[in-house]
Every structure is written in structure tokens, then in C-alpha cells.
Amino acid sequence: MLLSSPEESLALGARLAELVRPGDVIALSGPLGAGKTSIARGLLAALGLEEEAPSPSFAIVQPYAPPKSAFRCCTSISIEIEEAGEAEELGLDDAREDLAADRRMARAAGR
């Protein structure tokens, strides 16, 4: 899929919000500037987040919950996880049940 503007990325995120449910994982991957954060921001805005979501580059896991969003969800950066224990160490295992948007999923071993 090729999106040509930040507005198209935000709109895609909003469309994904119509489909996503608690427990879903959306894995976005691409080079820097590809629009991953804009897609996540569009999704979170459509789920009710009023402020701009920070880039997950500044937090491994960034949780959101009502009343800020329609349901509990989070964004995260997953980096070359080799063993399941590493996901738990990063706090990803705790967020797994509520995970709705997962950004930059490089590889999640065994999951």
C-alpha cells in the first residue's frame, strides 16, 4: 500500500479504528518517515484520543485507556525480540491483552 500524504495515513488509521477490537494487533513496518506514526495517530484519534499521540519512539509501550480512548490499547515499538522473555522484560507481555496498535513490529519470536 502506498500512501502519498500524512492526511492519507491519518485517514487509513481512522478506517482501521472501525475494525480494531481489544486484543487485535496491527503491525506496521517501514522506513523512517513512512507514515507509521500518522497511521497510529489516526487510529487513536478515531478511538477518541483528543491530544496528539506521541511517537512511540519516545516510549517502548505507550498505553491509552478510557476515557481517552474507546477501549484500552497501546502503541509500542518491537525490536528484534529473540526470546519470549525479552517481550515480558520490555513490558509487552503485560500489554498483550489490550494491544490494539503495534508499530514497527520487526520480529516477535514465537508469537
Image (tube, rainbow, N blue to C red):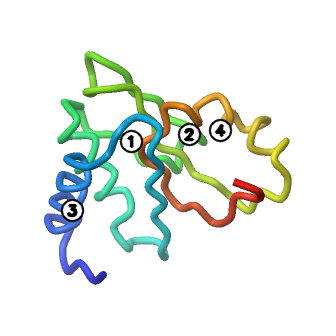
Kindly report the distance in space between the C-alpha atoms of the residues bearing marks 1 and 3. Answer: 18 Å
Rendered view: 10 above or below 56: below
* Residue 107 in picture, x, y percent from top left: 68, 64
Specify whether 98 is left or right of 5.
Answer: right
Lower sequence index among marks 1 and 2: 1
Reading the image, the residue beneath label 2 is 59
Q: Are marks 1 and 2 in contact (CB under 8 Å)?
A: yes
Q: Which residue is mark 3?
A: 12
Quadrant for the C terminus, please.
Answer: bottom right
Closer to the N terminus: mark 4 or mark 2? 2
- Distance from disc 4 to disc 3, alpha carbons, whole Å, reads 25 Å
| CA distance for labels 1 and 2 | 9 Å
Q: Which residue is mark 1?
A: 54
From this view, report whether residue 70 is shown above or below residue 61: above
Residue 8 placement (x, y as % from top left):
16, 68
Tag of residue 38: none
Relative image position of residue 91 (x, y in whole percent): 68, 33
Q: Residue at x 20, y 80 (%)?
A: 4
Q: Residue at x 42, y 42 (%)?
A: 100
* CA distance separating discs 4 and 2: 12 Å
Amino acid type at circle 3 is: Leu
Callout 2, which amino acid?
Ala
Residue 36 in the image: state x and y as whole percent. 38, 63
Q: At 42% across and 33% down in the image, what residue appears?
A: 73
Going from the N terminus, do you reach mark 4 or mark 3 first?
A: 3
How crowded pointer 4 is (Cα within 10 Å; few <14, some 14-19, many 20+) is rated as many
Tell me the amino acid under the disc marked 1. Pro
Q: Counting other residues with Cα less than 10 Å from the Cα at mark 1, is it few (<14), some (14-19), or many (20 or more)?
A: few
Dot 4 amino acid type: Leu
The kind of secondary structure element at disc 3 is: helix
Image quadrant holding the N terminus, namely: bottom left
